[in-house]
Image (cartoon, grey):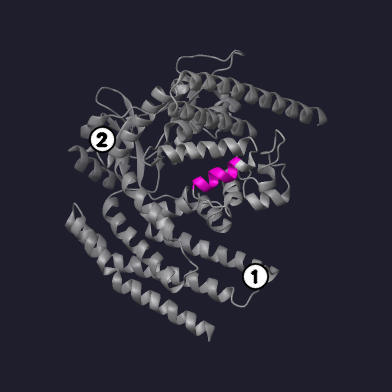
Amino acid sequence: MAGRSMWRATTKLLVATTTLGGGAAAATIASSDDPAMALKLCTNVPLRLYRDSVTAATIAFDYEYSLWGLPEGSAERAKAKHEVHMRGARRLEELCFRNGGIYIKLGQHLGQLEYLVPEEYVRIMRESMLNRCPHSSYDQVHEVVKKELGGAPDEIFDEFDPIPIASASLAQVHVARTRDGQKVAVKVQHTHMTDTAAADYATVELIVNTLHRFFPSFDYRWLIAEVRESIPKELDFLVEAKNSIKCMDNFRKLSPHIADYVYAPKVYWNLSTSKLLTMEYMEAAQVNDLKSIQRLGIQPSDVVKLVSETFAQMMFKHGFVHCDPHAANLLVRPLPSGRRSIFGRRKPQLILLDHGLYKELDYNTRINYAALWKALVYSDADGIKENCVKLGAGDDLYALFAGILTMRPWNKVIDSSVDHLVVKGTDGDRSELQIQGPSLESFLIIGRVSSEAVLESMLLQKRSLLSWINFWIQKILLEGRVCVMHIAVWLLQLQKALTL
């Protein structure tokens, strides 16, 4: 009886989504800048919509049927849930690759959502979506360059390598040389991505909303809202170019002490449009390429500190945060000035790529978030609860929210020992947290920068001599506290080394 009921719901889902899907195609044709091509593309919409419907219905039916009657908390239910998670993730992976377009981007989003979606989905999407992105043929690249810049690649550039050096879900990158001899990276959007994105987004939204209607426990409408905000920005490469300029301006104005250590490639505005972006070509190592970094004479620990400092400054001081910082978008090279540390080591410069997606934090969110991280790093349980509530995680969610942010269990978060945020590596901790997360050095940097942001906000609220004096007293105390914690960490590391 239950099986027949679920099958009827599944059938309704297929019928509803297929019937309503024509609207997505019509909207795409009407809004496209190339209606004839959009019409051709939209002949595929019914097929893609059917694929979506079958996959969504199959996954939902699998969950309902496979878990039916199994007691909550039982070993049988846990085993069945793991298996159905794996099947659902594989089905979704297959759908993303068959449909392409923003489906690849959606899969990449899922791969970054530890704690919010099942671990099986995170692992499978992360393993596949970054390594099997679509490629445009050279003929398609030729078409985009000619349409956007008014000439074929060999007419616009002195040299243009037809083989891309990198490909992502929305675009691919070619190496070229300008007429004045400058080596550049040309980011070319996959053909007709804007047209397919409109149709794909509409169909995905329809599927998710319909699924929620028939299966209320499957509610991923929040993910659609995220994609609705991010995809249009990522499809406009001029937004990416402007973001890179704003990012560098923020470091120069708000974080001048590390401005020389962070860099974004120069944009060639005369060779850039909303669908094609020409940038300075960067010779550098990926942030996770340990051997290359060492060959450059750079200490890997200095890179860790610089990455942590860079993103802490973005979050707590700038309120303008790069939202796609995976290894391919973070490069490292020696500081161009040649400056070295007191031990003679070459200092690193962090190069930020792919500025298509940033998150802007309003003043209150930025300061409350900084205050929360200050409390997390310094084991202030009351501060953690207070600022979690301010950020929307109520009294019953603050422990979970703290665990998501630190990737540590609650008992470690509020432990007052200096290394309270270090996971010792027990199987239980690793299973609960899925990944080990940031180093203690990173947490100390986050604690310092978040504390500075909170102090600076207090100074702005009360502009007086006494508040200025209090600010500097608190600043000195903060530096002293961080220094003591660094010494304690060094002693812990020394003790560990001596016991080996």
**Helix, strand or loop at mark 2:** loop
Which residue position holds label 1?
Answer: 72
Q: Residue at x 59, y 27 (%)?
A: 300
Amino acid at the residue labelled 1: Glu
Q: Is residue 111 above or below residue 266?
A: below
Q: What numbered label is drawn on residue 311?
A: none
Location of residue 76 in the rendering, given as x and y in whole percent from the top left corner: 68, 71
Query: Could you say which is closer to the camera, residue 206 or residue 25?
Result: 206
Assign the C terminus to one quadrant of the image. Answer: top right
Location of residue 44 in the rendering, given as x and y in whole percent from the top left corner: 29, 64
Report crowding for label 1: few under 14, some 14 to 19, many 20 or more residues within 10 A (C-alpha): few
Q: Is residue 499 magenta?
A: no
Is residue 186 among the parts visible in the rendering? no
**Splitting the image into 4 quarters, where does residue 359 fall?**
top left
Q: Is residue 365 above or below residue 281?
A: below
Report crowding for label 2: few under 14, some 14 to 19, many 20 or more residues within 10 A (C-alpha): many
Which residue position holds label 2?
Answer: 272
Ranked by sequence position, the earlier of labels 2 and 1 is: 1
Q: Nearer the viewer, mark 2 or mark 1?
A: 1
Query: Could you say which is closer to the camera, residue 111 or residue 469?
Result: 469
**Helix, strand or loop at mark 1:** loop
Q: Is residue 384 magenta?
A: yes
Instruction: Examine the residues drawn in magenta and state their main secondary structure.
Output: helix
The span picked out in magenta is 383-391
Disc 2 to disc 1, how far (Cα)? 56 Å
Q: Residue at x 38, y 55 (%)?
A: 225
Location of residue 364 in the rendering, given as x and y in whole percent from the top left corner: 44, 39
Query: Could you say which is closer to the camera, residue 170 or residue 436?
Result: 436
Is residue 48 among the parts visible in the rendering? yes
